[in-house]
Amino acid sequence: MSGSYRDLEAGGANKNNMAPIRNSNRNYYYAAPTTSTTASHLYHSETTWTSWLVPIFVLANSLVFIVAMYINDCPNKNSAIPVRGHCVARFLGRFSFQPLSENPLFGPSSITLTKMGALQWDSVVNHHQGWRLITCIWLHAGVIHLAANMLSLVFIGIRLEQQFGFVRIGIIYLLSGFGGSVLSSLFIRNNISVGASGALFGLLGAMLSELITNWTIYTNKAAALVSLLVIIVINLAIGILPHVDNFAHIGGFLTGFLLGFIFLPRPQYGWLEQQRLPSGVRFKSKYKAYQYALWLISLVLLIVGLLIALVMLFRGDNGYDHCHWCHYLTCVPTSKWKCNDS
């Protein structure tokens, strides 16, 4: 059995690629740095929200990691989790990390992650543990993995929550993570997967669709669009390296992209300012016609896409049977490495 770690880094700094984490019978891999960009509004919205949900998400992820380390209990020789090598930072007691040869991200074992709800195809489909599609979003492979994802969440999520509120951003985050898990399960059967990068890519996708649907109310929109597209392409390109669960990234991004059209359209400038207009001048619609069209199309695509993917997943379909070239989306073989399930 093998596993994958998903992560995402924000704030303008890229992290170095890392080699796969291996032990005797499991592989781990992770992904994808990013940064955020923005454009200036022609007007300020009436409400500026205080960000509290994103900090709670950060706290929740951190607490779950602490619990995972407590359960892992690397120094316990009577534990059912085999340890090959010496635990790292043994002064931490039962919170010490697995040997670096097994997990160089400074975290628990794959067995612990599986017990706590890591995404695993066999468990989801054959053992009816669909809850793993959600729980895997809150698990992280190690301190490095956790720190990278939480920095990304802070840089991307807080600004979005301040602009659009906790309800919409919370829905986008959770549904994007779910969408990433569903697509990952359709294609990856022999790996476990943990991490919040599907949800984070969803926020990135929502930023793109928000820019598109509110195009007319931005100023330096062309520069923002180019910057955002470059960031997205770079991050998805990193996902084609071996041991990277790029399907979780793609699924999260597509889900968030559609949700952005649904939840993040802004009213027309004149609609917000209509109280200052003469009494006989009023806008008939809060949103432009193309915003309504994008809203409807995105809602239909999202519902149909998730339903089809879930039916295929729980029916046991293999995504590669329907898309033979899709393996290139998550790994491109070179002279340096090969791409296979192990």
Image (cartoon, helix red, strand yellow):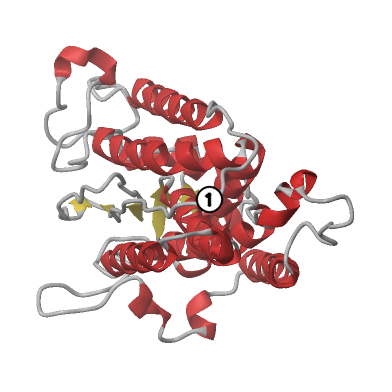
Front-lying residue, 35 or 185: 35
Q: What element carries label 1?
A: helix
Seen at 20% across and 75% down, the residue is 338
Seen at 12% across and 29% down, the residue is 86
Whether residue 267 is visible: no
Q: Which amino acid does the dot numbered 1 rest on?
A: Gly
296 relative position to 218: left or right: right
280 relative position to 146: left or right: right
Seen at 40% across and 69% down, the residue is 222
Q: Position of residue 153 (x, y in %)?
A: 41, 40
Whether residue 217 is visible: yes
Looking at the rendered structure, the number of numbered marks drawn on it comes to 1
Q: Residue most toward the right?
A: 280
Vertical position of residue 44 compared to residue 18: above or below: above
Quadrant of the rendered image containing residue 64:
top left
Front-lying residue, 23 or 67: 67
Q: Where is residue 192 in the image (x, y as percent from the top left)?
A: 41, 52
Front-lying residue, 175 or 287: 287
At label 1, counting other C-alpha atoms closer than 10 Å, the crowd grade (few under 14, some 14-19, many 20 or more) is many
Where does the N terminus fall, quadrant-wise? bottom left
Task: Name the residue carrying label 1.
Answer: 177
Q: Position of residue 299 (x, y in %)?
A: 72, 65
Seen at 44% across and 64% down, the residue is 221
Q: Where is residue 41 in the image (x, y as percent from the top left)?
A: 51, 52
Where does the C terminus fall, quadrant-wise? bottom left
280 relative position to 137: left or right: right
Vertical position of residue 308 compared to residue 207: above or below: below
Front-lying residue, 308 or 209: 209
